[in-house]
């Protein structure tokens, strides 16, 4: 077991969930639940083999996992063949229960799937797969209501299924191999493909409102039981706005015809009937004033998307001298740029992001420094259901996003080494010592790890299954 004294942020982000309840198990004891945030101390104990931790699914599913509670290699091969897993798109870890964990990288439209999407496409068919494949030992994770062990714990070793040879990995090596896995499109492995395509004679039932009812359904079917006329009109307005764009004159005409068709009894028999048009018009005016808040719906941008450009790196090196400031601005630009391009210049950034980039004690002072240099603008906005601040960055002109082997670069020093030559770095920094420090730091970061220097030869890596 490796002696670990620090948690890699990428390991924590991909394989654990900091917020919400989690479970832990001491050696020889039972599982216990904690409702406190998961701290680095417990993760370090997990990596050092002092206990096990298990977390539930986060909002976005970076890593999928199939759990097999059996030591039968034949069953493992059957499952891998069914889901089309191989050494190029999955890793296999032996679990403490003498079973196997198959780890893969799920994607949907080349983006990290949300928890609800992952459940709808894959996890909710778990019982169907157990029945059809005759495998009661199969479980699909992560789930929102059941925790799963994080990798690299005690008695959790990655193996080669051909020779059953163990591979002892560090956090950095695991992240490196995980990033190199070919993503698996959920549409290719969804059990929905196995369901019979046939229609059954079912009794037609009326649509009743629940939280998942959309504006489109209300627009086509009219108001439903359980929802107010005011809420119905607002959902229909949003649906038409996102379908047709900001054509407000035409939107007013459609809403007028909708009210005439579906709320005629209220108009004719209620003394407040005349207010239906006034309220709908007020809602449309509110939407017109706050158009930027609703333009990016639904999830036009995935929360795991980040990118930066070469001009951003030059701007950071010229305007910020301290390495901690440079890293913080780099992370801020990566987060801000794609969102500003999609939803407009004002982007909502949660306080936890600032704390992650800097610290609890310094992030406000850092914001004030950026404001004093006319780099950052801040405004308070009230968004329904939460209080949030919006930020606007004055960035240089945008070039094309920089990727490494088709994937996003997360580390500042690795990005510099990827984009600039040594001579260009010296011209930007004016100091060979800084250039040497940047290159040494970049070598320790996951993005430029060389598999041949990780303690495993290439032939062993290619046998990963």
Image: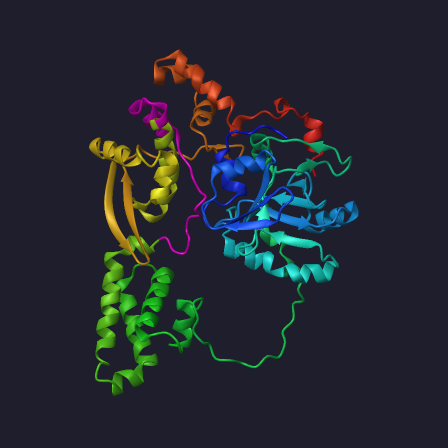
Judge from the rendering whether residue 405 lies leftward or rightward of residue 238; answer left or right.
right
Residue under the image location 62 percent in, 53 percent down: 140
Vertical placement of residue 52 versus 146, above or below:
above
- Depth order, front residue of 173/459: 173
Vertical placement of residue 37 versus 45, above or below:
below
Res 108 visible: no
Query: Magenta includes 112?
Result: no
Quadrant of res 224: bottom left
Judge from the rendering whether residue 132 lies leftward or rightward of residue 424; answer left or right.
right
Residue 133 on image: x %, y %: 73, 58
Judge from the rendering whether residue 68 lies leftward or rightward of residue 394; answer left or right.
right
Task: Give the extent of the magenta segment.
Answer: 296-324
Residue 276 on image: x %, y %: 25, 76
Quadrant of res 391: top left
Residue under the image location 40 percent in, 18 percent down: 425
Res 175 visible: yes
Residue 365 on image: x %, y %: 26, 33
Residue 266 on image: x %, y %: 29, 83
Residue under the image location 33 percent in, 62 percent down: 241
| Residue farthest toward the front in the current orientation of the protein | 29
In the picture, the quarter occupied by the C terminus is top right
- Depth order, front residue of 341/112: 112
Residue under the image location 67 percent in, 36 percent down: 157
Quadrant of res 350: top left
**What colour-coding does the image apply?**
rainbow
In the picture, the quarter occupied by the N terminus is top right
């Amino acid at each position: 077991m490796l002696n670990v004294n620090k948690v890699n942020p990428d390991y924590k982000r991909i394989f654990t969930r900091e917020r919400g309840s989690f479970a832990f198990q001491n050696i020889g004891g039972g599982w216990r639940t904690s409702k406190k945030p998961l701290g680095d101390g417990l993760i370090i104990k997990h990596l050092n083999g002092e206990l096990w931790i298990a977390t539930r699914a986060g909002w976005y599913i970076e890593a999928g996992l199939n759990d097999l509670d059996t030591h039968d290699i034949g069953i493992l091969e059957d499952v891998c063949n069914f889901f089309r897993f191989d050494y190029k798109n999955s890793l296999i870890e032996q679990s403490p229960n003498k079973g196997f964990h198959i780890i893969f990288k799920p994607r949907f439209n080349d983006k990290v799937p949300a928890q609800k999407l992952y459940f709808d496409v894959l996890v909710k068919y778990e019982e169907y797969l157990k029945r059809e494949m005759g495998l009661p030992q199969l479980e699909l994770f992560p789930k929102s209501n059941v925790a799963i062990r994080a990798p690299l714990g005690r008695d959790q070793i990655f193996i080669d299924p051909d020779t059953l040879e163990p591979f002892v990995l560090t956090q950095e090596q695991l992240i490196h191999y995980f990033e190199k896995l070919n993503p698996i499109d959920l549409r290719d492995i969804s059990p929905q493909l196995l369901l019979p395509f046939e229609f059954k004679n079912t009794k037609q039932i009326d649509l009743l409102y629940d939280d998942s009812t959309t504006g489109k359904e209300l627009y086509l079917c009219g108001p439903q039981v359980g929802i107010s006329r005011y809420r119905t009109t607002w959902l229909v307005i949003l649906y038409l706005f996102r379908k047709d764009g900001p054509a407000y004159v035409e939107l007013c005409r459609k809403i007028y015809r909708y009210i005439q068709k579906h709320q005629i009894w209220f108009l004719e028999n209620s003394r407040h009937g005349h207010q239906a048009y006034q309220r709908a018009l007020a809602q449309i005016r509110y939407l017109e004033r706050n158009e930027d808040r609703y333009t990016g719906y639904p999830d036009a941008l995935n929360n795991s998307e980040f990118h930066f450009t070469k001009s951003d790196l030059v701007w950071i090196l010229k305007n910020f001298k301290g390495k901690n400031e440079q890293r913080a601005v780099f992370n801020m630009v990566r987060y801000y740029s794609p969102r500003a391009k999609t939803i407009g210049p004002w982007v909502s950034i949660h306080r936890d992001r600032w704390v992650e980039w800097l610290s609890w004690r310094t992030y406000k002072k850092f914001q004030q420094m950026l404001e004093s240099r006319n780099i950052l603008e801040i405004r308070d906005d009230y968004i329904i259901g939460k209080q949030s601040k919006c930020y606007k960055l004055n960035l240089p002109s945008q070039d094309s996003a920089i990727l490494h082997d088709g994937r996003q670069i997360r580390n500042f020093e690795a990005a510099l080494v990827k984009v600039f030559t040594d001579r260009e770095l010296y011209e930007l920094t004016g100091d060979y010592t800084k250039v040497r420090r940047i290159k040494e730091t970049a070598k320790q970061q996951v993005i430029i790890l060389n598999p041949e220097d990780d303690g495993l030869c290439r032939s062993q890596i290619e046998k990963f299954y």
